[in-house]
Every structure is written in structure tokens, then in C-alpha cells.
């Protein structure tokens, strides 16, 4: 990949990357309904984002719409899926096969979005050595060996809060480049590592607070 | 509850509600380490949030720190958990017992944060009538009857994208007041309904994009 392309990729703002999957979901839905063309105005209306924002977001993707009819839906779906990396499998390790970790191993839906969990890691004797949906669970001490063998780039963090930082440090040392943090703990990571925090507990806090305020 | 209290609760900004669970996780960690007092400066340093922001966020919670030593950890944990609603069970229904939905039913961790999933709903004959972790799965058509019986306030949405809006409309009609949306579809909801979008696919898009740009 040429240097210009690298710059191009980095230039995609995070908010754009977060909105593109919404557009994709909606456009795929229109496809199942038998539609063949869609305009950015239609997408905007449905998603509650301004039409100019939609057009700007889609300008990062290599696709050109036709005047009046808009984008060809088949092409837009393919181009978006490829652009978002959903068509290529990215290898991931999952750390902490507790209740949530095991649940994520059970979910086969992530495969369809380019995330392939190839192994789980834990230290508890009752889970180490087991498999969930054919995904093996190894002892955390075997991480360096399995990383050499499997070369995962993403680490899914579902360990207890008190182990979150320690395990993060260790998975980064083993060569993992991105951490998907499902714990409510704010992990510290070096600048070159990508981190995304799934804030399930933050969502609960917001919902409970708003529910309580409206009900009482 | 008096009118003033209602206003007080509504006044808590969403960013504050989203940060408080981070503080709670960190303070609980300090508690397990045997610490008894903690200052907002210590929390700020650990969480990478400004100290004045931490103090401001904590000012919404009914707790007063002592000069120099800060907050008593035991009290702070209790007060935060109560404030965030994690000590009271909120009844939830889960809609769509597919791969992700079933995984969420398997996860018993949410109970500890005040979310009690009391039933799942689906339309597929192979899941309707089954139970997961003692949680029964009913046919979607039985929603009104079970809602009358169980009175859930939260709906967890894990249906396929093409059913997302339809099921949302229906669960709101049945009296659900908050929707936790795990689909990549942007559902439309009335203003008085609370919605939180878990953007798993947005996170994947961001991680994949940043990984690709740094590796090539």
C-alpha cells in the first residue's frame, strides 16, 4: 500500500467510522426489500443524520452515486462491507472466560462482521482445557506460544476488574495491537495500541437514571 | 419524591453518568487492595479524566470528602452503586434469542449491576418454549400478557436488523420504557423512551480501520 493510501485510511474520522455501520445496516435492509438504488437523503432521513453528513461520510468510501437515483444498493453494500473490514477475518483472542467471556464465545454472529475469535485464555482450572463452540480455552501462561502460532491482532478483555490492567499489559507485550475492553475498568494503553471500550455498565447507568427520573 | 428531586435526577448529564461506573470500578479495586480513603485527584490520575471533572461528577452523588484524605472508600462504593441504580433489580425482556441474544441470557454478570432479564421473546419454534439459565423464552405474540404479569421496564433488542423497528414499536406499545439496542440498526423511538445503542459493529469498524492503517 502506498503512503498516500495509508494517510487516506488514517484520515477517516472515528465518528464517520461509527456511523458507516448504521448506513450499512439500513442499506442491507433496503436490499432485502428489493430496492436497487438509494440516495444519501433517504439514508439521512432514516438514520436521523443530516444529509450533508451522510454524503461526507460516504465520500471516504470509494463509491460514486448517480444524479437523482443515488447509489446502487448492491455496490454500496459490498463497498461498505469491504471498507469497514467486515469481509476479512481478523483474528482475536478472548481474555477471561467467565460469564460474559463465555457468552461472547457462544455468539457466532461476530464472525459475519470479520471478527474470528480463535482462542480464549483464562487461569481457572475448570475452564482451561475446555472448548466453547470449538474455540479452545488455554492457560494464560501459554499466550506467547499461541500468539506465535496464531498471530491474533485483537484482544477481547472480559477479565475481572482487578486483573484488567495486568492482563492488558501482558497481551500488548505478546503483540496484540487492539484491545476491545468489555470491563468497566479504564485500562491504560500505549499510544500505538487501539482501544475501544464497550460501556455496558455506562448504558445501564444512563437507562436506570432516566427510568427512575421519569417514573417517580 | 418531590419535584425538586426529579429535577435533580434529570439534571445529571449523560457524560457524567457514563463516567461514574469507571470511578466505581476503580474505587472497588482500591477497596480490594485494602485502601480506606481516596481523593478525586487519585481517581482522576488513574482514569485519565481531569481532577476538576471528577470532583464535578461526584458532586451529583450525595457524598462529601474530607480535606486531605478524600472520600471514605466503603461509603463511596455504596453511594455510587446506589446512585447508579446497580443495587436495585430492573426487570428486562430480551427480544430475539439468536446467537447474541442467547449469549446475553447466558451471562449472569448483568444481575450484579441491577439488570434482571426475566424473559426472552422470539418467534422461532426451536427456541420458543425453551429456557436459558432458567429464563423462559416466550412467543412474541404473548408479550402483552407477560408484560401485564411481569412489568418489565427495559427491552434488550437482539433481533435481526429487518425486524428491529417493528419489534421496537411493539415493545414500546406494550409499555417498555427503555430500549437497549444491540442491533446495528438505528431504531426510531418516541421522545419519552430511553434508548442506548451498544455499537459493537462500530467498534469493530474502528479497530479494523486503525489496525489496517498501522500495519500496511
Image: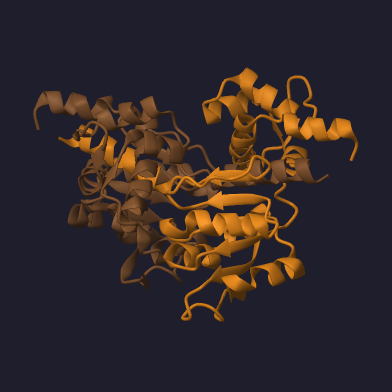
Chain colours: A brown, B orange
Residue drawn at x 51%, y 37% is: A186
The image position of residue A38, as x and y in percent, is: 30, 42
Q: Is residue A212 left or right of residue A156?
A: right
B79 vs B73, nearest the viewer? B79
Residue A69 or B147: which is nearer the viewer? A69
| Residue B16 visible, this orientation | yes
Quarter where residue B11 is shown: top right
Q: Say which residue appears at 67% left-offset and 38% top-offset.
A: B35
- Residue B190, quarter of the rendered image: top right
- Whole-percent x and y of residue B104? 52, 62
What residue appears at the point 54 percent right and 45 percent down from the top-left corner? B188
Q: Residue furthest front?
A: A68
Residue lying furthest right in this view? B2
Placement of the C terminus of chain A among the 4 image quadrants: top right
Q: Is residue B138 above or below residue A102?
A: below
**In screen coordinates, is B164 left or right of B148?**
left
Q: Quadrant of the N terminus of chain A?
A: top left
Front residue (pair A58, A187)? A58
Q: Is residue B70 visible?
A: no
Q: Quadrant of residue B64?
A: top right
**Figure check: B188 above or below A6:** below
Query: Residue A64: image x %, image y %?
Result: 19, 33
**In the image: residue A184, left or right of residue B16:** left
Residue at the image point whose x is 32% and y is 42% from the top? B205
Expressed as whole percent of the image width and height from the top left, the position of residue B211 reads 25, 38
Amino acid at each position: 500500500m502506498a503512503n498516500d493510501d495509508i494517510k487516506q485510511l488514517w484520515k477517516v474520522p472515528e465518528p464517520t467510522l461509527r456511523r458507516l455501520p448504521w448506513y450499512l445496516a439500513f442499506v442491507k435492509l433496503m436490499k432485502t426489500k428489493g430496492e436497487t438504488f438509494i440516495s444519501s437523503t433517504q439514508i439521512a432521513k432514516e438514520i436521523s443524520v443530516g444529509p450533508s453528513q451522510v454524503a461526507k461520510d460516504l465520500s471516504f468510501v470509494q463509491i460514486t452515486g448517480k444524479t437523482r437515483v443515488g447509489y446502487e444498493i448492491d455496490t454500496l453494500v459490498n463497498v461498505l462491507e469491504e471498507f469497514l473490514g467486515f469481509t476479512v477475518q481478523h483474528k482475536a483472542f478472548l481474555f477471561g472466560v467467565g460469564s460474559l467471556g463465555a457468552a461472547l464465545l457462544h455468539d457466532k454472529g461476530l464472525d459475519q462482521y470479520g471478527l474470528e475469535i480463535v482462542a480464549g485464555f483464562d487461569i481457572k482450572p475448570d475452564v482451561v482445557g475446555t472448548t466453547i463452540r470449538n474455540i479452545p480455552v488455554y492457560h494464560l501462561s501459554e499466550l506467547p506460544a499461541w500468539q506465535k502460532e496464531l498471530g491474533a491482532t485483537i484482544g477481547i478483555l472480559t477479565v475481572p476488574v482487578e486483573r484488567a490492567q495486568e492482563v492488558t499489559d501482558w497481551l500488548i507485550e505478546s503483540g496484540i495491537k487492539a484491545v476491545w475492553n468489555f470491563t468497566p475498568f479504564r485500562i491504560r494503553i500505549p499510544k500505538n495500541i487501539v482501544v475501544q471500550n464497550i460501556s455496558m455498565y455506562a448504558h445501564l447507568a444512563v437507562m436506570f437514571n432516566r427510568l427512575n427520573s421519569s417514573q417517580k
